[in-house]
Amino acid sequence: MSESVAKPGAVARACMRACALAVALASAACAVQTPLPELPRDVPTAWRDQAAMPGGLQPDLENWWRAFNDATLDALIGRALDSNLNIQIAAERLKAARALQHRASREFWPNLNFRIYEETAPNARVGYLEVGFDSTWEFGFFGRAQASERVAMADLNSAAIDDAAARVTVSAEVAKTYVELRAAQARVTQFGKLATLRRQQVELAQTRLRTRLGSQLELDRAQAEWQQTLGEADEPRQMMVASTQALGVLLGTNAADPALEAVALQPALPSIAIGTSPADLLRTRPEIRRAEQNVLKAAGELGIARADLYPKLGITGTLISSTALTGDLDRPNRAVPLAGPSLSIPIFDWGMRRDVVNAREAALNAAVLAYREAVLESVAEVQTALAQFAAKTQAVTRVGVSTQASERSARAAQTLQRIGLGDGVDNANAGIALVQSQLQASNVLRERALAYIALYKSFGGAMPPLETEAATK
């Protein structure tokens, strides 16, 4: 036997050393992981100790607008959820993110490619046409696979959150615009009644002036109030036009809905009390869920940066058939299989990889701080919305009492005039006071409805189930 031939024992020892090295590298690779930071879950003490309102309703995050009991509003929101362009944009972005996440989950799987290309021999005497297959398989060691999965998962979850947030925003905007439209229609009607009464005051003042029972000052004041009322009616008319157009945009069309032109009752809410601590609802806010995903993505990017400090391990293989096209054409075709490990070891790069790691660590710390800021801002917004809704609810009660008193006063003035104990001036003044109370009541109902919409928008709406690392394994 020739001395150049390796002995079986030497080959076995070499294989054992290679296996030991592979096991050691794999063990080291599995040990390098980037843990996710622990995000603070607690809310401020004032919130933690806040008790739910006794007998309150559990918030309906999916169909909250049905509390208005308005079939037209229900239909408008249903159409908007189907036709709104922003919702469609968010849905397409979610599809894109889902496709990229599917790609990322297979980034470290083996791949197979078919290639046809030409190549010239180093001595420039023979040209070959090469046809065959090649395959690469990077293992994703040192936390690279987990980090890449986190980045793609965060992007997918953020797109899902944006899709849900778009639906929340559109629903709230449709409800808000519809409330503004109906309130404007009610004010136009009420200003019409008020203008009629103001004109009657002018006519009475003119009669009193002719009979020397009144003065020119009284007539001038009545005319000024009449003209002012006519001018005040312009604002709700403009609001009607603007609200109708805004609803068209929200519904994805430039044509106004004829059903909205007919005057209808102003939406009014029943008595509502929130029966769940607002802090329990913060988990549904898109800002907080998005901030969580930003932390996940930052951790993934840090993991990739750290993995770049270590070797890249994998397996490559080819099966190529080479045909001589020029030169020595007598060479037969050959299909040569080849397989072996691939290894790339970073040695010296002027510290650029370490700079990237330092930058990603700072970015992760910033993402955690941004999450904490999102929680604080959400607490403040929900607290403000709750206080605003409670204040507007009390205002509706007070205005209701005032309106009832104005109605009794108007009926009494009419009775006095009918039995001859009062005149038209007292009757007109009482009617004006009643319409002004109704205008105030209409405005307060509108403000309470808008506060209710703002409250549910601050809750964030129902969030979809999100991808987690455990769910994808």
Image (spheres, grey):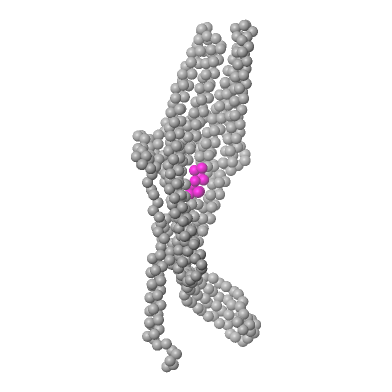
Residue positioned 57% across, 73% down in the render: 115
Q: In which quadrant is the C terminus drawn?
A: bottom left
For the point 58% across and 43% down, the residue is 252
Magenta segment, prevailing SS (helix, strand or loop) = helix
> Which one is in front, 72 or 1?
1
Q: Residue placed farthest to the front in the image?
A: 350
Q: Nearer the viewer, residue 396 or 266?
A: 396
Residue at point 52%, 44% (across, down):
81
Position of 58 with respect to 215 (left or right) is left
Residue 218: % across, % down: 60, 13
**Residue 25 screen position, x and y as percent:** 41, 71
Question: In the shown orientation, is residue 371 left or right of residue 92?
Answer: left
Coordinates of residue 51 in the picture (x, y in percent): 35, 37
Identity of the residue furthest to the bottom in this view: 1
Q: How many numbered callouts? A: 0
Please identify the quadrant where the N terminus is shown. Answer: bottom left
Camera sees residue 263? no
Magenta stretch: give its range: 161-169
Q: Residue at the spot x=62%, y=21% of the render?
A: 227
Does the magenta portion include 39?
no
Picture layout, residue 287 above or below residue 134:
above
Would you identify the image quadrant in which residue 398 lies? top left
Would you say residue 242 is visible in this rendering? yes
In the depicted structure, whether residue 430 falls above or below residue 342? above
Q: Is residue 115 left or right of residue 144?
A: right
Residue 39, position in %: x, y? 40, 51
Determine if the magenta segment contains residue 162.
yes
